Image (cartoon, rainbow, N blue to C red):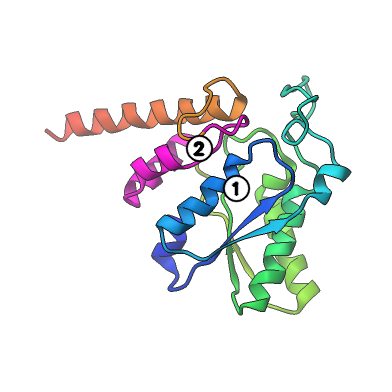
Amino acid sequence: MFWALQRFEEVETITFDYGQRHKSELEHAKAIAGKLGVPHRILDMSLLNQLAPNALTRDDIAIEQEEGELPSTFVEGRNLLFFSFAAVYAKQIGARHIVTGVCETDFSGYPDCRDVFVKSLNVTLNLAMDYGFVLHTPLMWLDKADTWCLADELGAFDFVRTETVTCYNGLPGDGCGECPSCKLRKAGLECYLMERKQEEGASR
């Protein structure tokens, strides 16, 4: 959001309620938008939970990944639907730019986070609605350390560290520290802090 706020005069945000176990994701998204003075809307996507059972929406499915398989946290069709509904809403308000935080540099292997998918869908949405959307993925080629660096450059390092939710168990900030998402986040943070410390030492 900070990236978008630096580039566009007007920004609106959408959060999708697809029955995720970590409801704090919805609460924090609303709170973040409020703190930044950005309009926020929650769209009901609970149908996803009925169609594609997964570890993010079902307590009886463990968070795990078998060798050669997608992790149990992968929600089939999630980003395809999210982008599509975001595009429908964007057209209604006259917006052409849609920004998302998907990344394939050190991701969990989700096929709908890949650059080729986003570019393909961009073309499809433009054809489907006869409208010139531009899908932005500022994090696509950044690893987690680079993402922390970007947050710092945008003046949002502390905000991102304390206010955001990436934990599969819905814990804010540094999260549970045990799930795959928290481990990726922690490794990236430690790497960036080490690099920043080295740069600060070299500049003295």
Tell me the residue at 37%/32% (across/down).
192
43 to the left or right of 137:
right
- Rate crowding at label 2 as few (under 14), some (14 to 19) or many (20 or more) other CA atoms within 10 Å: some
Q: Is residue 131 above or below residue 147?
A: below
Task: Indicate whether residue 153 is drawn in magenta.
Answer: yes
The one nearer the camera, 72 or 56, is 56
- Picture quarter containing residue 111? top right
95 within the magenta span = no
Q: Are marks 2 and 1 in contact (CB under 8 Å)?
A: no
- The residues bearing labels 2 and 1 have C-alpha atoms spaced at a distance of 25 Å
In percent of the image, x 58 and y 30: which residue is there?
181
Q: Which residue is more in the foreground, 178 or 110?
A: 178
Image spot of residue 68 (x, y percent): 79, 24
Residue type for callout 1: Leu
Q: Which residue is mark 1?
A: 26
**Image location of residue 37, percent across then percent down:** 42, 63
Span of residues in magenta: 143-171
Residues 90 and 69: in front is: 90
